[in-house]
Amino acid sequence: MIRHEKRFPLVADDEVLVGENPIMSLYDESDLISNIRGPYQEKEFSWSTDSQRVASAKPVAQTEDELLPPLFEAKPSHYSRKERLQQLTKTKPSPVKTQGQLAREQAREDLKKKRSATYLRDEKTAPAKVVVKPPVVSTTESKAGRLTRLADNLRQTDYILADMPAVYSLKKEDREQEQVIKKNSYDFLRKSQVYNYPERRQQRDRQVAQELNLTHIEEE
């Protein structure tokens, strides 16, 4: 391992290494809107001027009253609400009516004339016609009497077969009799071409016999 020696710069005993941070006084009393009178000129905030100002300024012991924010005198503004209300009450309404007021008055007079028209008073309301409906005769009684007469003439000659539910007996003999004979599901194999070997052999033998049988030629 190689050790690196760090050599610090040589500084005199009287030389200052760390100084005070520059302060930028952005919010002075002269910058407030209430204190600005006349044309306003922006201030130049640079590190050089602030550092000079800090160096020249000496710390002065301030009392509690001096540390408090400055108090401003309350001055009445020229545009107060009370004055405006007083001016409105003092000003009298102008005797000359506007065009909108004249139009409203004319519309009210027209409504009064229309409501007090003569044709509305002389018109007589015609009495409403009363529609008299004829009394409705209930046909339920007549239908009921006819049905009773027809029912008296009915006679039963045949019995009506009722659908009775199936009753299953618990005896073994009865159950064996009731069992339906099931069809053999392998019957189709007997007639099938795949498993029908003896019939296929008979057909082949007949074909061979016909080919070799030459007797019918001699007979002719």
Image: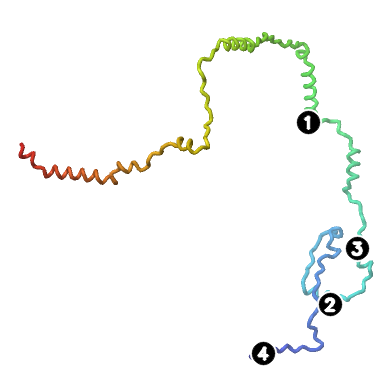
* Number of residues whose C-alpha sits closer than 10 Å to that of mark 1, classed few (under 14), some (14–19) or many (20 or more): few
- Write down the residue under mark 2: 55
In this figure, which residue is indicated by the disc labeled 3? 70
Up-down: is 98 above or below 53?
A: above
Q: Check disc 2 and give the amino acid type.
A: Ala
Real-space CA distance between mark 3 and mark 4, rounded to the nearest whole angstrom: 59 Å
**Which of the two discs, 2 and 3, labels the residue nearer the N terminus?**
2
- Going by the numbered disc 3, the residue's amino acid type is Pro
Left or right: 163, with 6 as reference point:
left
Marks 1 and 2, the one that precedes in the sequence: 2
Q: Percent position (x, y) of residue 169? A: 52, 35
- Residue at label 4? 4
Decide which of 144, 76 is in the foreground and name it: 144
Residue 49 lies, in percent from the top left, at 80, 73
The CA distance from mark 1 to mark 2 is 74 Å
Q: Amino acid at mark 4?
A: His
**Camera-side residue of 130 and 4:** 130
Q: Is residue 129 above or below residue 25?
A: above
Picture quadrant where residue 135 is located: top right
Quarter containing the N terminus: bottom right
Q: Nearer the viewer, mark 2 or mark 4?
A: 4
Chain-order first, disc 3 or disc 4: 4
For the residues marked 4 and 1, what is the alpha-carbon distance in whole angstroms?
Answer: 98 Å
Q: Which mark is residue 100?
A: 1
Task: Give the residue type at disc 1.
Answer: Gly
The residue lying at 73 percent from left, 88 percent from top is 9
Foreground disc of the pair 3, 4: 4
Q: Nearer the viewer, residue 151 or 133?
A: 151
Task: Report whether 219 appears left or right of 76.
Answer: left
Measure how far apart labels 2 and 4 are at the Cα level: 40 Å
Instruction: Give the SS element for disc 2.
Output: helix
Is there a contact, CB below 8 Å, between mark 1 and mark 2?
Answer: no
